[in-house]
Structure formats: C-alpha cells, structure tokens
Image (cartoon, helix red, strand yellow):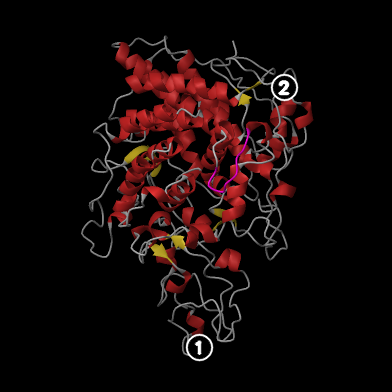
Amino acid sequence: MFNQTKYILALGLIGAGLAVTSCKEAWLKPEPLSFYEPDLTFKDLAGLKATLVACERNLRMEWYGDAMPMITESIFSDIAVEGTTDKSGPAQNLNLLITPDAQLNHIDYNRIGWYWLEGYKGIKYANTAISRIDLPTYKNEQEKNELLGAAYFHRAARYYRLTQQFGDVPLILAEINGPKLDFQSTKREVILKKMKEDLEFAEQWVPAVTDKGTVNKGSVSHLLTKVNLALGLFDDAIKSASNVIDGGTHKLMTARFGVNANDAARNVVWDLHRPQNKAIATNTEGLMLVIDRLNIEGNVDGGMLIMRNAVPFWFNNINTPNGKRGTIDTYGIEIDQVSKLGRGIGRLRPTDYSQNQIWDDKNDLRHAPGNWTRMEDILYNNPAIKGEDSFYGKNLQLKNAEGVVLTIDTIRCWFDWPNYKLFVEDPTRVQPQGGNSDWYVFRLAETYLLRAEAYAWKGELAKAADDINAVRARANCAPLAPAKINIGTILDERARELYFEEPRKTELTRIAYIFAQTGKTAPNGKTYSLAKFSDENYFYDRVMEKSDFYNKGVKTRHADEYTMSPYHVLWPIPQPAIDGNTQGRINQNKGYAGYEKNTPPLTEIPK
C-alpha cells in the first residue's frame, strides 16, 4: 500500500532543486525551458525510485488545490465553462485572454502554463531515472526493467498530454545536467511513435499488480491505447485495450462494495466514487490512481477543494418568490445543507449538454436522485426567514409565479451536478469544500470506451456497441443499438461516465486530429485535414454544437462574453518558454502571435 517515506525521499533528493517560483517572478522574466540543477547521483535503487515517486506526486496535482488544473481542461471543451462572473480575467473570452504572453498559470485565470511547466517537470523526473538506470545494482533484469518501464510510462503520460494540448513540442529523452537553450519543436507524430515504442517495452515488464498509486500493467496498456488511437493505429488500440479488459486483473465493479455497501439508499455508482473505496483491494476497476489522504506524510495541504470549485454558489444570490434571501451556508442550523452539498463557488460551470442533453435513459444511476443533485433538490434554509416567509423549508424554484428569475446569476449560482463524484468528505472544515482523497487517473470503464472508439473508427459498430453497453449496463441503462454508434455518441458516453475524470480538451483534440489525419466523415457530416487543422477542426465544431455559452452572445454579470475560435484546438506555447530558448526555436501554434517566426519542426528523434 501507500509508502509514506517515499515522499520524503522524493522531496529530499529531487524537490529541493525544483521549488516553483512565485507567479510574479515566473512571469516578469523569461525562463528558459532548462532543467539545470546541481548534479544528483542515484547509485542505489532507493534513490532512483525516488524519481518515480516525484512523478507520482507531480501527476496528482492536476486534481488538487484551488482552481485545480483539470478545470482548464474542462472549460476548453463541450462539458463546461469558467463560472466566475464577478471579474475579468478568468478564461471566458478566450479570443481576448488566451495569448502566449498572458497570465497562463494563476488560479484567477487559467492553468495552461501549469500543464507546460509541470508536464516538463514530470518528464525531467522520468528522464533522471531513465538516464541513470544502469547505475544501481539489481537483483535481476526484471527488477531493472520494472523501474525503467514505470519511468517510460510517466514520460509517455506527459508527452501524450502535451502533444494533444500544444501539438508539436520539444522532445527530451535524456537527463539534462547543464544549461540548454537550443530546444527545437518536434513533430507530434514523431513524439507519439517514440512513446508507443517505450510503452510497448513497459507493457512487457511492469507487473500486473503493484502498490496502489504506482504504475501497473493495466495503466501502461491503457495509456498505450490512447497513443495508438492518436496515431490512427486502430487495430493496435484494440489489442492494447483488450490486454486490460481481458487480462484477468481488472473488472468493472458491478456489485455493491466498500463503505456504505449496506446502505440500501445508495448504489454501485456511489460506491465506486467514495474516496475510501477507490484504492481498496476489492476495487478491480481502478487502473491508475493518485493517492492523497488526511494525516499522511506528503499529502496536499487542504486537499482537493473539488466542491469549492465544481459545486454551484447555491447559498448566495438566490431569493424566495417573496424576494427574501433564501439560502445560506451556515453549518449546524436547522436545515444544514452545507455539510451535505459543500461550499461551492461555481468555478466549473457545466453546460446544458452535460447537465441535460446527454441523459438518454431515465434509469441511469449516474443521473439518479441521490447521485445527481438538482437545484430543485435544495431547500430554502435561511433561518432569518423562518416564520416570515412561507417558502422556508420548501424546495428552490428558479422563477416565481410571474416568471421572474429568482437569482441574479444563473451562471454561477444555478446548475445541477454529479454529487456522487464531487462529494469528498472534508473533516478539517465545518463548511466542507472537498478534502484529501484518492482519485482515479485511469479507470477500466474508460478502457471499454477507448476500445469502443477504436472499433467505431473501423466501422465495427456491433463490437463498439458491446463495449459501450458494458459501461451502460453497470449504470442501469438500456443498451444502445449498433446503428446508433458513432464518435459523437461515444463522446456522449464519455461525458456521462468520466465527468471531471477525463481531460476532456485533450481527448477532443485527439479525436479532432484523427478526423484530420484520416479524412473520415465526422458525425456532423464534415471532413477535415491536417493542413487546415487550426482553421477548421472537429474540436471547435463540436463545442459550438454542444455548448450553450461559447459564441452564443452569453455574458457574465461582469459583462465578459464567452468566445472561442477554431485555433483553440491547441493552446499557446507560453511566451517565456520561447523567449528563454535563445539558441533554438520552440514553435508557436497557429492563431497566436509569433507563429510567423516558426521554423520546420524536427521530423526525427533528436540525437
């Protein structure tokens, strides 16, 4: 199980040289993409393993802290938008605010720059282990290659994300021990082919069962499936996904288990997402997890804050039909709702697509009462109106009898959400915001949906339907007929099953690339090409089709309009990375200032 001393090793041997500079320092002066730090030696196995623990900790931070980076992945997609409505700066008017020299790594704006910085930091950790793999003495070849395979996984995981977020990026395959200012962008396909090669090696050596939170064979094969899909290698994707699904180690959880297992008011979907259940031995669905628990060494101070960010601002700006303040976040009162719902501020605002459009079965447990919370489930609970307002203790309503909306902010204060997934116990706060919790990175349900996607690309719709329906059956949904299956319906099922688990922008961009690479007709009847990828792409067209915010004239209370353009399929390379690379060229993506200075990217593995 979880080894508390690993974090001490990681921080002692690696972390001291990598303290993150303040936002002010990082953005006032150009910082090269340089990994220089004092020479570190890892001549024993424990020292080298510490680099992998640093990788694990780095991986974890995507879901933790205030304005966690996963929010940025979600709002650049069809499922959600940035819900902050009282100031300018958050990523809403993407056409105006998302530029290479903007503030791209701040909790009040967006976390694009976090993905760049932390992606390469994870690559640095992995490369340290890879470059020094021959230094320790091993019991046998298996022990050595297990460690090497795990390092390959972590490097590939970062490059998979970077190539779907930013496109062509520098490829670094070895530890860098001195200043380096001559990085070059490498073609995305070249990077992915190298990651495929590394993951196929790792798949042969990484054990099927490992400590929770560490790399196992299933997580390697799952990531390899994504890489195979990104390369358009659909048969290979089917094979790597089948290695997980049919491998005997991992199974979908279809029966009640863990804490609350005897609570008849709950169900298996609730069980699956209880923090206490994610890493237990009986849970055979989790492939890759990040571990974070209260009162263990190395945990995240303050925890996930997932309810603060992803639950609506339900306790403010909502009046009764009589015009009085109806809700309040005080704990311990007669109708204490903050303890059950969390104290949200509505940063992650789901679209109508993810709240309503995708729910095609009234029996779906993922959308059922108790798992899914609707605003109308909340009660008017303000003690100050008890005895004065007849609506005290009754369910909220959006409009009064005359049709007047009873909140001044429907964006931030009024939306429904998957409470079963977002509710995380927070014993350190009387007004819970989401505490320390393990979290799924990869889960077998997604593996089924990835294999379904590979079958769909090949036109084998009956097999695709079988895989989708395996996931739907667990949620108590009726099966989909093969004739109903296409990439769009698979994305719908991903949205139902993987809300705030999957990096939605990454996966939409990957699929957009496949349409452009293959020239296959998309569900919207259009075809795409790589030559015009930043001008016309499936990513943008799908967001425009599904989102009720972007380019629809919707504005916040602060008068900031939600806008998006086709070039947002790729994020801007942060300008400090380009400016600091004085002896080489890191290319900028089309649509952003500096693109005109690009040079041809590398098409071979750098020496």
Identify the secondary structure beneath mark 2: loop
State the residue in front, 113 or 596. 596
The answer to whether any part of residue 104 appears in the image is: no
Nearer to me, 474 or 306: 474
Q: Amino acid at mark 2?
A: Arg
Residue at 47% x, 78% y: name it.
Answer: 380
| Residue 228, placed above or below residue 115 | above
Residue 217 placement, left or right of 81: left
Measured from the top left, where is residue 288 in percent x and y? 37, 36
Does 527 lie within the magenta span? yes
Q: Residue at 60%, 44% (x, y): give it.
A: 526
The segment highlighted magenta reads 522-529
Q: Which residue is at the front of the view, 298 or 507? A: 507
| Residue at horizontal 59 percent and vertical 43 percent from the top | 538
- Can you see residue 172? yes
Q: Considering only vertical position in the picture, is 18 above or below 303?
A: above
Among the two numbered marks 2 and 1 on one chain, the one whose residue lies closer to the N terminus: 1
Q: Name the spot of residue 85 as percent of width and height, x first.
A: 65, 61
The x, y position of residue 110, in whole percent, is 63, 46
Q: Amino acid at mark 1?
A: Asp
Give the secondary structure at mark 1: loop
Q: Which labelled disc corresponds to residue 389?
A: 1
Measured as percent of width and height from the top left, residue 425 is found at 38, 56
Which quadrant holds residue 412? bottom right
Question: Which is the main secondary structure of the residues drawn in magenta?
Answer: loop
Q: CA distance from mark 2 to mark 1?
A: 66 Å
Which one is in front, 163 or 518?
518
Judge the density around disc 1: few (<14), some (14-19), many (≥20) Cα neighbours within 10 Å.
some
Disc 2 target residue? 585
Left or right? Give the position of 89 relative to 384. right
Q: Residue at x 37, y 29 (%)?
A: 240
